[in-house]
Amino acid sequence: MNENEAHCLALLREADRDRYLSVLYAPEDRRGGLAALYAFNAEIARIRELVHEPLPGEVRLQWWRDLIKGEARGSAEAHPVAAA
């Protein structure tokens, strides 16, 4: 498991304990990808808690959308969940 996947597991341990535990039961060769997927879900769900106005939330969602499409400014390596 690489450093980014370990970050995803740590994020899950704090944000979504049930999914964190489910990753631990997954086959070892699948844990990294599953942790990254669940951590991405936790990051998206957390936007609602972090922002109190619609526009900043939309900006964050657009950044993730652009990153997934490969159109984001900067590198995916800058965010551990995106890099995983």
Image (spheres, rainbow, N blue to C red):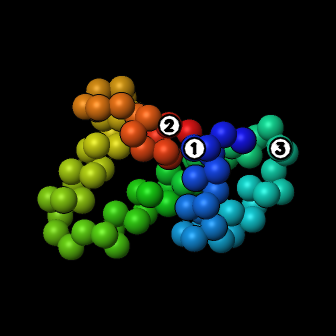
Q: Residue 13: x, y in percent?
A: 63, 67
Callout 2 amino acid = Ala
Q: Residue 53: x, y in percent?
A: 16, 69
For marks 1 and 2, the one nearer the N-term is 1
Callout 3 amino acid = Glu
Callout 1 amino acid = Asn
Mark 1, residue position:
4
**Looking at the rendering, in which quadrant would you find the C terminus?**
top right
Residue 83, labelled with which disc? 2
Write the residue at 83% across / 57% down.
25
Q: Nearer the viewer, residue 69 or 20?
A: 20
Gap in angstroms between the C-alphas marked 2 and 3: 19 Å
Mark 3, residue position:
28
For mark 1, give the secondary structure: helix
* Residue 79 location, quadrant: top left
Tag 3–tag 1 contact (CB < 8 Å): no
**Looking at the rendering, in which quadrant would you find the N terminus?**
top right
Tag 1–tag 2 contact (CB < 8 Å): yes
